[in-house]
Image (cartoon, rainbow, N blue to C red):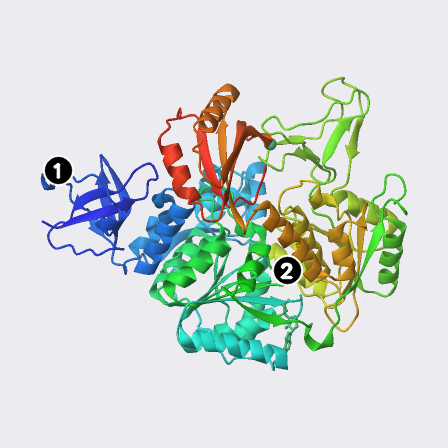
Amino acid sequence: MSRARLIVLNSALGPLDYRVPQGMTVAPGSIVVAPLGPRQLIGVVWEPERLPTEEVGDNRLRPLLHAYDLPPLAAPLRRLIEWTSDYYLSPIASVLRMALPSSGALDGARSITEYRATGHVPGRLTPQRAQALERIGDRMGLVRELAIIGGVSDGVIRGLVKTGAIEAVEVAIDDPYPVPDPDHDPPALEPAQTDVAARLHEAVDAGRFAPFLLDGVTGSGKTEVYFEAIAESLRHSRQTLVLLPEIALTEPFLKRFAARFGAEPVAWHSGLRQSQRRRAWRAIQSGEARVVVGARSALFLPYANLGLIVVDEAHEASFKQEDGVQYHARDVAVMRAKLEEIPIVLASATPAIETRHMAETGVYTELKLPDRYGGARLPDMAAVDLLASPPDRGRWLAPELVRALEENLDAEEQSLLFLNRRGYAPLTLCRHCGYRFQCPNCTAWMVEHRFTRRLACHHCGHIMPTPHACPKCKEEDSLVACGPGVERIADEVATLFPDARAAIVTSDTIWSPAKAAEFVARMEAGEIDIVIGTQLVTKGYHFPNLTLVGVVDADLGLSGGDLRAAERTFQQIQQVSGRAGRGDKHGRVLVQTHDPNAPVMQALIGGDAEGFYAAETEARRLAGMPPFGRLAAIIVSSEDQAEATEVARLIGRTAPRHDNMAVFGPAPAPLAMLRGRHRLRLLVHAARAVPVQEIIRTWLDALTFPRSVRVAVDVDPYSFL
Ligand code: ADP
Ligand code: ZN
């Protein structure tokens, strides 16, 4: 009898054995449907010897129900899924899920029914219906998707379908994608760029595992150069995956790619509609999608013929996934390249210390582009000492920065003010009784958003209207905003320069690729004088007329005090500085700080990246911190504080002893409450050679926890909250 061992898409279940019915053929990687009790589950056939489990007798096996007519997941992807599951201590089913789409795409339907507005206005236009129609505009999607866009229930959308205001349309999902042409419009490379492109060319031709660190200052042409590698991969008819850290960067990337290759690449991110997702998934697994640009989730897709991976802005912390499978996409990407035996390019102007270390030890090949393209100079950097020349009372921009903004306005050049804080003010309190608005679900202040007149928690999304009176002492108009967010800076700009055209760029205003495109168009048309933005504006954009960058609070990122605080501050300021003076005009950067003598500020102002990195790396080496040692966090959470504490203590008490390994905690996490759950942390710190994952697995597997307690392990943590 023929048997098959499956991983089914249910993280609570281990491997399961089934009978393969007569007439069905499956191989490792085949995607199938299996019965489980009264239900049907999607699963993938796996090599039984790689998934040991208790043998079940032939007579007790149920037959598989269906095998999809799709190529099996290839061996390198299966090994990647296993590796990710082992390394990040996550159920293999949770990792596998990222490789598979919804069942719709598996069926291979050629079309899908979507809905769109007809322009007909229904007789009974309730406020909800009006809101839905206005927000939907000319967009299409499933009923569920339109309901989300419209901010209404599915029922409202269905009602609109009945009235004829919204209609059903069949959308083809197997239309071919246009094929990018490697020779559509190649640039003439400069000598340094030519050398680097030649190295990448060679690596793509060789088709072996080869990790590269492409290290070049902002504006040096890293993108142009890795485009040459993509061109070569296209000539070999192989697929390329480009990972970007934020969805917001996809839109400008698609345009730029299309200008170079004559066709847009295939996008993959959480903003896609179901129909787009299905079409993309099918094209990726058939090999028809030649170049895929995506967020981290694109990493686990079943590429038919992957030939090259590029990770752009490879130092970005957003490549680390913080919930579900807590993997680092940069590290998993390198592993995928290794298993697929293909080259990978990590591009960055400010490579992470971990990546630099790999280059220094010769594991990665470092390729450098030391100068900006076309002789453009890097901007001048200067510190503004907030203690020596502070802003006026109740203001946040120091006189020197205000003067610089004024000069830029006079010169009709654009400026950017960077502050990594959304909303109006990070803290609101009552000046009468001192009451502070705290999130009921989190250890966090409610952040005022003045435009929408709301207080919002940036951790759990809890919102409330901004009240007129203090909820505690009932005093009217007694609430005061403490500290600045981007909205408050925008207010200050409006007061200082009433005629300047300002724009706020945060995830509140740029929440879709279309919004990002609109922002780019307005900048390019010169319709914006001053941009006030969060980290969303630090990357990717190229505005030749932007010549001044003001960093409103350079000390902000240092206060957390975690392992990477200084490094992150350095990267972020360096990155946002890279937006200044990218064209013919020279740029300058003013960095507001209370401590201009801090080593990280000195390194930024003095342009001494090498010195800064050397000092940081040495500090990490001495402390045995990554990449010289290992860290793993264990986070225990429960709605019941006593229960969470008890479990955390149990874990602490049973901590195994090992040479070169220490376990700290449990202690309340800095975010002691998050989304209504109380949280405690333990931190495991070990030397590189210690098999931390194996130790933690054995340790936690021996314990049992109440179902209401969640125990999550974060291997190589980036967040210390
Ligand atoms: P990076 O990715 O290192 O920030 P980019 O590739 O975005 O740099 O290049 C910066 C700017 O210079 C872009 O507008 C790019 O099109 C332009 N550029 C770079 N190299 C060339 C080249 N060889 N020919 C024409 N334009 C170039
Ligand atoms: Zn909250």
Mark closer to the chain start, 1 or 2: 1
Q: Residues within 10 Å of mark 1 (few under 14, many from 20)?
A: few
Extreme residue in the front direction: 659
Seen from the viewer's position, the closer of residues 223 and 167 is 223
Residue at 49%, 37% (x, y): give it: 153
Name the spot of residue 44 as percent of width and height, x first.
27, 50
Residue 303 appears left or right of 64: right
Select label 1 or label 2 by which is in front: 2
Q: Quadrant of residue 55?
A: top left
- SS of the residue under disc 2: loop
Question: Label 2 sits on what residue type?
Answer: Thr
Residue 666, placed above or below residue 270: above
Q: Is residue 256 depicted above or below 421 in this figure?
A: below
Q: Which residue is mark 2?
A: 350
Alpha-carbon distance for marks 1 and 2?
Answer: 58 Å
Residue 669 image label: none
Tell which of 238 and 124 is nearer to you.
238
Q: Amino acid at mark 1?
A: Arg
Counting from the top left corner in percent of width and height, residue 37 is at: 22, 34
x then y, percent, for residue 89 = 41, 42
Q: Which quadrant does the C terminus fall into?
A: top right
Q: Looking at the image, can residue 54 be seen?
A: yes
Q: Residues within 10 Å of mark 2 (few under 14, many from 20)?
A: many
User: Mark 2 CB in 8 Å range of ligand 1?
Assistant: no
Question: Which residue is under mark 1?
Answer: 60
